[in-house]
Image (cartoon, rainbow, N blue to C red):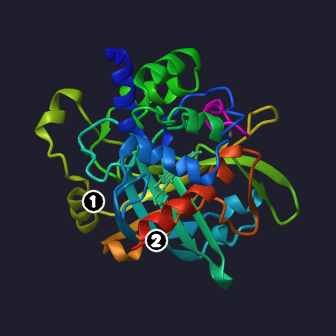
């Protein structure tokens, strides 16, 4: 039976997209793998040829990153040398619906490819919430497993799982509370996953990062949402870039012993030390050909930065490749 609350949860899953999931017991007969994770996304959003299976609606941009030498104490990555490096960017709306309304609640994405000296690259895809909604790939899959009869997610089961397992809640509440960003350039973005940083002396440190807009965040008041067009973010970004510098500070949040490095549904306490690691400047909104072919695999990392023990990272690497193969297939 499709309950109202079940439908609401499915609508919220569809709106939130990439990160919608509930923590569930593992599924021994069908552990999450790259293929069934992408099948799960297609089950929720449908199959849209040529589009990413998550972050489907988006826009390419170009930029430049200048690292802050203070970050060299944390990582020897060449990104923090202080020399400008070119960056290819993609801003997106969460979820696998390429027609997702931009005046609706849900997360936004900021993906980046840093082209570092000596052919090194640093790839990442960040979201406008400090938490992801599934701690493990199995939990991610469980919330998207289609009902065998209807081939669609079962809202009643998802609602029951959402009520039973708490992982899903922090981000849902965050999205409801923070509202709809008025611009891709006026909202904070988080890595949510932890990474291991190593400095030139070999000292290691776990950290997460966030991108903070230098001119602050802007949200649309709930009672004004209906006055916004369903599609406005790309034009807004073009207008903004033409008029004012669009810049983000990259801020590292440093873990203390005991902070979980394997669970992206848990934000570390806000009092953890933060280091401004550099500034990202968005210089132009660019043609779709500049970023459409890229799969922003978060495990493509420069010397000085490694993945953590977070099981989402390997799942992301695999499923992004599957999604890329499907969307680029003719
Ligand atoms: C098991 C967990 C996850 C799965 C299965 C998953 C799956 C996917 C897939 C299949 C894509 C499309 C990739 C492509 O076609 O190039 C994607 C895109 C994206 N994901 Fe995830 N994801 C997961 C976790 C996360 C997390 C933790 C974050 C955030 C920090 C995140 C942020 C994004 C963003 C921003 C995009 C759009 C990237 C772009 O513009 O190309 N995802 N995800």
Where does residue 286 sit, x and y in percent of width and height? 32, 73
Tag 2 secondary structure: strand
Which residue appears farthest toward the bottom when viewing the image? 118
Q: Magenta region: which residues?
A: 262-272
Mark 1 highlights which residue?
237
Name which residue lies at 83% across and 53% down.
204
Q: Nearer the viewer, residue 299 or 116?
A: 299
Instruction: Determine the main secondary structure of the stretch shown in magenta.
Output: loop
Which residue appears farthest toward the left when viewing the image? 227
Mark 2 highlights which residue?
88
> Does the magenta-highlighted stretch encompass residue 322?
no
Where does residue 8 sit, x and y in percent of width and height? 34, 23
Instruction: Name the quadrant of the C terminus.
Output: bottom left
Instruction: Name the quadrant of the N terminus.
Output: top left
Find the distance from the CA under tag 2 to the CA under tag 1. Answer: 15 Å
Residue 82 lies in quadrant: bottom right
Q: Residues within 10 Å of mark 1 (few under 14, many from 20)?
A: many
Q: Is residue 178 left or right of residue 135?
A: left
């Amino acid at each position: 039976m499709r309950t109202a609350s079940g439908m609401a949860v499915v609508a919220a899953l569809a709106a939130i997209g990439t990160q919608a999931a509930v923590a569930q017991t593992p599924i021994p007969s069908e552990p999450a793998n790259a293929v069934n994770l992408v099948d799960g996304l297609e089950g929720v959003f449908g199959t849209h040829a040529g589009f990413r299976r998550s972050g489907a609606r988006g826009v390419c941009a170009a930029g430049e990153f200048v690292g802050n030498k203070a970050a060299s104490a944390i990582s020897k990555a060449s990104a923090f040398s202080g020399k400008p490096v070119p960056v290819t960017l993609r801003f997106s709306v969460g979820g696998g619906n390429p027609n997702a309304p931009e005046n609706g609640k849900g997360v936004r994405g900021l993906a980046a490819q840093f082209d570092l000296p000596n052919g090194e690259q640093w790839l990442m895809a960040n979201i406008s919430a400090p938490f992801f909604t599934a701690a493990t790939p199995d939990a991610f899959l469980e919330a998207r497993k289609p009902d065998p009869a209807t081939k669609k997610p079962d809202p009643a089961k998802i609602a029951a799982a959402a009520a039973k397992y708490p992982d899903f809640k922090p981000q849902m509440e965050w999205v409801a509370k923070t509202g709809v960003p008025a611009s891709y350039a006026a909202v904070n973005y988080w890595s949510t996953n932890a990474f291991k940083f190593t400095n030139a002396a070999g000292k290691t440190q776990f950290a997460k990062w966030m991108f903070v807009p230098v001119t602050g965040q802007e949200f649309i008041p709930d009672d004004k949402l209906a006055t916004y067009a369903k599609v406005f973010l790309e034009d807004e970004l073009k207008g903004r870039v033409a008029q004012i510098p669009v810049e983000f500070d990259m801020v590292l949040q440093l873990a203390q012993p005991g902070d979980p490095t394997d669970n992206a549904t848990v934000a570390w306490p806000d009092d953890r030390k933060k280091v401004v690691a550099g500034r990202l400047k968005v210089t132009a909104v660019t043609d779709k050909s500049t970023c459409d072919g890229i799969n922003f695999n978060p495990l493509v990392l420069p010397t000085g930065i490694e993945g953590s023990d977070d099981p989402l990272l390997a799942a992301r690497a695999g499923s992004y490749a599957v999604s890329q193969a499907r969307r680029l297939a003719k």
